[in-house]
C-alpha cells in the first residue's frame, strides 16, 4: 500500500508536465527598441578669441533597425553647419551653447549640447564710415564690435570726435563742418571697471582750389626757388612740376612736397636755361588741380 501511495502522484505529475510541454503558448509583445543618440566631442571648450573649435559627432548612433541620416550643428553665435564633423571659429569672447541634432531613418531625432567659453581682452574696436569726405558731412562710428571676456560685459562706450565734441553709446553719428584731420577715440569700460581706448582718423576735406601767387626766382647760379599760397587747408600733396622752355607744355613731377608746404628750391640747373613751373595740388579725396604756370631764367 505504501508503494502505490508514492507511484500514483508521480505518474500524475509526469502527465501534467507532458501536457504543458505539448501546448503552444502565445508570444510576449515588446515595443520598438530603436534609440537615436547625438554624441558630441570637441577639440576645446575654452580658449582665447579667436578660438577655432573642431566638433565631432561621429560617435552618434541609432540602434535596432535604423540608421543616422542627418547631422545639424548650431554654434551658438547664429552660425550653423551640417555633416558628421564641423569646424568653427569664435571671433569674440562669450559663453556659447553649441548643439548637434541628429536625425535617423525612422524619423526620430536627438540633440546634444556643449558649452564653449571664449575668453577675450576688453578691446575697443571702431568701424567708421566715411573716413574721408568734403565738409559738411556726417560720419557714423560703430563700436559694437568691441570685445570683452565672457565673464563680463561692456557697460559704457565713450566717444571723442577730435573737434571738441563727445557722445556715448555703441553706435553714434557726428557731423564735421570744419576742415582738418580729426582723431576719433572710443573708450570702452567693462563690468570690472577696466577701460580700453582705440582711435581712428577722419579727414574732413575742404573744397579743392589751385595754389595762387606762384613765383619763381634764381637767387644763385644754377638754382631756382619757388613760393606759393595754398587755398585749400587740407592737402595730401603739392607736386612741383617743371618743363624746359618758355613755351613748353610737357611737365614732369620733380618733387612731392607735403600739402602744407609753400616753398621749394632746387640747384644744379643749367645756367641761362628757361624753365616753367607749376604746382599740382592733391587732396585726400584724390582730386587734383594745377596752378597757373610761372617762368624763370636760371642764373
Image: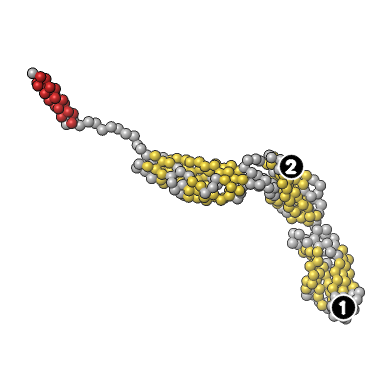
Q: In this view, does 60 lie above or below 290?
A: above
The secondary element bearing badge 1 is classed as loop
Counting from the top left corner in percent of width and height, residue 272 is at 88, 81
- Residue picked out by circle 1: 222
Q: Please give the residue where the numbered disc 2 appears in the rendered image.
A: 168
Name the quarter where the C terminus is drawn.
bottom right
User: Residue 137 placed where, x, y %?
Assistant: 76, 51
Please determine whether, in this image, residue 132 is positioned above or below residue 65. below
Q: Which of marks 1 and 2 is nearer the N terminus?
A: 2
Neighbour tally class for label 2: few under 14, some 14-19, many 20 plus, Cα within 10 Å: some
Q: Distance between the residues labelled 1 and 2?
A: 60 Å
The x and y percentages for residue 118 are 59, 45
- The answer to which quarter of the image holds residue 171 is top right
Mark 1 in CB contact with mark 2 (< 8 angstroms): no
Is the residue 50 above or below the residue 210 in the image?
above
In this view, the residue farthest toward the left is 1
Residue at the right extreme, as displayed = 219
Secondary structure beneath dot 2 equals strand
Residue 146 in view, yes or no: no
Residue 289 placement (x, y as % from top left)? 79, 65
Q: How is the image coloured?
A: secondary structure
For the residue pair 168 and 295, the one nearer the viewer reads as 168
Q: As drawn, is 71 to the left or to the right of 231?
A: left
Amino acid at each position: 500500500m505504501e508503494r502505490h501511495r508514492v507511484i500514483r502522484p508521480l505518474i500524475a505529475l509526469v502527465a501534467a508536465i507532458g501536457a504543458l510541454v505539448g501546448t503552444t503558448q502565445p508570444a510576449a509583445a515588446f515595443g520598438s527598441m530603436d534609440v537615436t543618440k547625438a554624441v558630441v566631442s570637441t577639440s576645446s571648450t575654452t580658449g582665447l578669441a579667436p578660438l577655432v573649435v573642431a566638433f565631432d559627432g561621429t560617435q552618434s548612433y541609432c540602434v535596432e533597425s535604423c540608421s543616422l541620416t542627418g547631422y545639424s550643428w548650431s554654434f551658438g553665435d547664429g552660425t550653423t553647419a551640417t555633416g558628421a564633423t564641423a569646424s568653427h571659429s569664435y571671433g569674440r569672447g562669450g559663453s556659447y551653447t553649441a548643439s548637434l541634432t541628429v536625425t535617423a531613418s525612422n524619423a526620430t531625432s536627438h540633440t546634444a549640447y556643449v558649452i564653449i567659453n571664449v575668453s577675450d581682452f576688453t578691446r575697443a574696436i571702431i568701424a567708421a564710415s566715411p573716413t574721408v569726405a568734403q565738409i559738411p558731412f556726417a560720419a557714423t562710428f560703430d563700436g559694437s564690435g568691441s570685445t570683452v571676456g565672457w565673464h563680463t560685459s561692456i557697460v559704457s562706450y565713450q566717444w571723442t570726435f577730435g573737434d571738441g565734441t563727445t557722445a556715448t553709446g555703441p553706435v553714434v553719428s557726428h557731423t564735421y563742418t570744419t576742415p582738418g584731420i580729426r582723431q576719433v577715440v572710443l573708450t570702452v569700460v567693462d563690468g570690472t571697471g577696466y577701460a580700453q581706448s582705440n582711435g581712428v582718423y577722419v579727414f574732413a576735406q575742404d573744397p579743392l582750389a589751385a595754389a595762387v601767387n606762384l613765383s619763381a626766382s634764381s637767387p644763385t647760379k644754377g638754382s631756382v626757388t619757388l613760393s606759393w599760397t595754398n587755398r585749400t587747408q587740407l592737402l595730401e600733396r603739392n607736386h612741383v612740376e617743371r618743363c624746359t622752355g618758355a613755351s613748353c607744355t610737357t611737365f614732369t613731377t620733380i618733387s612731392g612736397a607735403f600739402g602744407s608746404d609753400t616753398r621749394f628750391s632746387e640747384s644744379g640747373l643749367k645756367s641761362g636755361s628757361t624753365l616753367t613751373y607749376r604746382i599740382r595740388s592733391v587732396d585726400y579725396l584724390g582730386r587734383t588741380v594745377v596752378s597757373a604756370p610761372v617762368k624763370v631764367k636760371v642764373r
